[in-house]
Image (spheres, grey):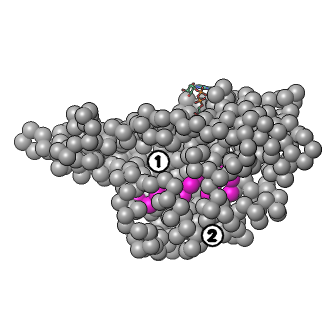
Amino acid sequence: MRLSNDEALFRQEIRQFFSTQIPEDIQERSAAGETREPDDIAAVQRILNEHGYAVPSWPTAWGGRDWSPVQEHVFLDEMHLAHVPEPLTFNVDMIGPVLCEFGTDEQKARFLPGTANLDIWWCQGFSEPDAGSDLASLRTSAVRDGAEFVVNGQKTWTTLAQHADWMFALVRTNPDAPKRQKGISFLLIDMRSPGITVRPITLLDGSVEVNEVFLSDVRVPVANLVGEQDHGWTYAKFLLGNERTRVARVGVSKNRLAQAKRLAGETPAGRGTLLDDPILRARIAEMENELAALEVTLFRATSGDVDQAAIASILKLRGSELQEQTTELIADIAGPTALAVDGPSDEIPRWAQRSIRSYLTQRKVGIYGGSSEVQRMIIAKTLTGR
Ligand SMILES: Cc1cc2nc3c(=O)[nH]c(=O)nc-3n(C[C@H](O)[C@H](O)[C@H](O)COP(=O)(O)OP(=O)(O)OC[C@H]3O[C@@H](n4cnc5c(N)ncnc54)[C@H](O)[C@@H]3O)c2cc1C
């Protein structure tokens, strides 16, 4: 995990950038779990874009930086450590790379600059009420009618669709294909099209982050088809691989563990503080070890000499488990004060009041991007070769 001299200099440069260029109020809100969507995310993305940091992993022709995997990791780590809200993953990690790889020249010119600058807000229309883990059973249909597709169906769990200008969606174009995966296409759908209804779903922590999206006779120009008709599964697999490696979020868990230690040290217990409790100390030490192991695995993944399919699943699984465990730890440190049942209270610190919401909302990271059970299946299959 030791960085070379050049890599250490790179870390310094990035640290300097985040500490001087991102407005403090945005960092403070992010650290408090109170990022304003869409404004804070858009503001940060435009600052990144101005400095050439918006889309480092894209090809250089479209704003990429040609960084090594270690540099990409360091950049993300510093972003997390500085409490800078992450760029919109649907733009930067999902549709951008798909269009760079499989889009037409016209699609690239039309969408990539606005995607990098967040002038276009994308949402991901993959999951359906009966197609989550088993995504290939999706039923939203797209029937060709001249120069358009007519799309009918329902998507669900569509994150931040309430802000979205466009949706990239998987649709069934051939219901009679010999294999379910073969009849799926990848379409770009303008969210202002007639026939689209977005209905919010309230999450366990009370936030409205995900939505149901209903599509009724929505007309989509054939020019908005990505790649070949009926080959959308290939592009979706490419996209999902990127999603899994991003969610390890080592820096986020590092921040939370540091916060947990600080808070435990400030919370009176017995004759000292909670941090004197040997059971809590052991729990923190265990998590620190697990986090160090995850970071080593991440560095091994960047070296490229390990099975990439299995490693993406391992990073997703362990990364999301640690995100869940660290939020649970902070809620435990808050103890009964986490349950401010009568609503916001001046006597209870904000972090404690927020801790239970944070704990509840983090349950999601073990579900989206492929649930933990599904990741274990992938790891087992890769290891056993079956
Ligand atoms: C907060 C949040 C945001 C999301 N955002 C988006 C989004 O923007 N766009 C989008 O398209 N989707 C999104 N999703 C959907 C997400 O991808 C799905 O929830 C996920 O794929 C699981 O599908 P499901 O909810 O239908 O559960 P199911 O697939 O029905 O799974 C139910 C349970 O069965 C288990 N299970 C399923 N299959 C297997 C198996 N083969 N072996 C062992 N266990 C199995 C699962 O682990 C789970 O515990 C989001 C989900 C959440 C929670």
What residue is shown at x 19% (from left), y 49% (from top)?
265
- 347 vs 85: above or below: above
Percent x, y for residue 164? 62, 50
Q: Is residue 101 visible?
A: no
Q: Range of the magenta residues?
A: 83-96
What residue is shown at x 70% (from left), y 62% (from top)?
112
Magenta run includes residue 319: no
Instruction: Kindly identify the amino acid type of the residue bearing the numbered disc 2.
Output: Arg
Q: Nearer the viewer, mark 2 or mark 1?
A: 2
For label 2, the crowd category at 10 Å Cα-Cα, with few meaning under 14, some 14 to 19 and many 20 or more, is: some
Comes first in the chain, label 2 or label 1 = 2
Q: Nearer the viewer, residue 320 or 39?
A: 39
Question: Which residue is disc 1 drawn over?
Answer: 294
Q: Nearer the viewer, residue 314 or 142?
A: 142
Q: Nearer the viewer, residue 282 or 326?
A: 326
Residues at marks 2 and 1 touching, judged by CB atoms closer than 8 Å:
no
Percent x, y for residue 176? 88, 27
**203 relative to 218 in the view: left or right:** left
**Would the CB of label 1 be found within 8 Å of ligand 1?**
no
Q: Residue furthest front?
A: 194
**269 relative to 153 in the view: left or right:** left
Please tell me whether mark 2 sits on a helix, a strand or a loop.
loop
Question: Which residue is disc 2 drawn over?
Answer: 65
Instruction: Kindly identify the amino acid type of the residue bearing the numbered disc 1.
Output: Leu
For label 1, the crowd category at 10 Å Cα-Cα, with few meaning under 14, some 14 to 19 and many 20 or more, is: many
What residue is shown at x 79% (from left), y 59% (from top)?
107
